[in-house]
């Protein structure tokens, strides 16, 4: 997740919807040479909130799994020689009770992907609000 997406998809969303039933999980992955554990910790500090959890996916294990799940094609990464597909700058939403991380209820992205909507902060918040309303929150 990039910092701009972290603001729109996470921080603004949590601020706009103070319900305790809404949580944000950030997964930081190395994309640029400066992306390391310390950068992830700094981002986690910047976007800390009681309903937010942060994870560092140094070897992109989660990112590769989600690329397969979301049908994201091979895309060159920032790491030399790493041509495996992986998901980054994706925003995944899960309804209460959905325990299958491989099956988000909906998702958006900031990639060159055409089979899912491009991230839009306002639309993201509308979709999350609708999910919360459906669950009676």
Image: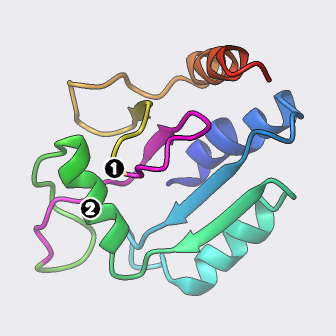
Q: Are marks 2 and 1 in contact (CB under 8 Å)?
A: yes
Of the residues tagged 2 and 1, which is closer to the observer?
A: 1
Q: Secondary structure at mark 1?
A: loop
Dot 1 crowding, Cα within 10 Å, few <14, some 14–19, many 20+: some
Residue 59 location in percent, x, y?
33, 81
Q: Nearer the viewer, residue 83 or 127?
A: 127
Q: Residue 104, how many percent across, how many down?
A: 41, 38
Q: Quadrant of residue 96?
A: top right
Start and end of the magenta stretch? 82-101
In the rendering, which numbered label is found on residue 102? Answer: 1
Classify residue 20 by image quadrant. Answer: top right
Mark before the other along the chain sequence, 2 or 1: 2
Mark 2 crowdedness (10 Å alpha carbons): few <14, some 14-19, many ≥20: some
- Numbered circle sitting on residue 65: 2
| Image location of residue 94, percent across then percent down | 53, 38
Is residue 96 within the magenta segment? yes
Q: Is residue 63 above or below residue 7?
A: below
Question: CA separation, marks 2 and 1?
Answer: 8 Å
Q: Residue at x 57, y 72 (%)?
A: 55
Question: Can you say which quadrant of the picture contains the C terminus?
Answer: top right
Please state which of residues 62 and 111 is positioned toward the viewer in this rendering: 62
- Assign a secondary structure to mark 2: helix
Q: Position of residue 48 (x, y in %)?
A: 81, 62
Residue 12 is drawn in which quadrant?
top right
User: Going 53% across and 23% down the picture, which residue do you hit?
Assistant: 120
């Amino acid at each position: 997740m990039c910092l701009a997406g972290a603001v729109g998809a996470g921080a603004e969303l949590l601020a706009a919807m103070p319900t305790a039933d809404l949580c944000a999980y950030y997964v930081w992955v190395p994309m640029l040479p400066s992306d390391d554990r310390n950068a992830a910790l700094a981002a986690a500090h910047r976007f800390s909130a009681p309903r937010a959890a942060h994870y560092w996916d140094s070897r992109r294990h989660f990112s590769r799994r989600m690329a397969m799940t979301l049908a994201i094609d091979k895309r060159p990464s920032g790491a030399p020689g790493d041509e495996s597909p992986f998901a980054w700058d994706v925003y995944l939403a899960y309804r209460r009770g959905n325990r299958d991380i491989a099956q988000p209820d909906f998702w958006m992205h900031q990639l060159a992907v055409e089979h899912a909507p491009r991230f839009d902060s306002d639309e993201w918040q509308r979709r999350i609000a609708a999910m919360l309303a459906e669950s009676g929150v």
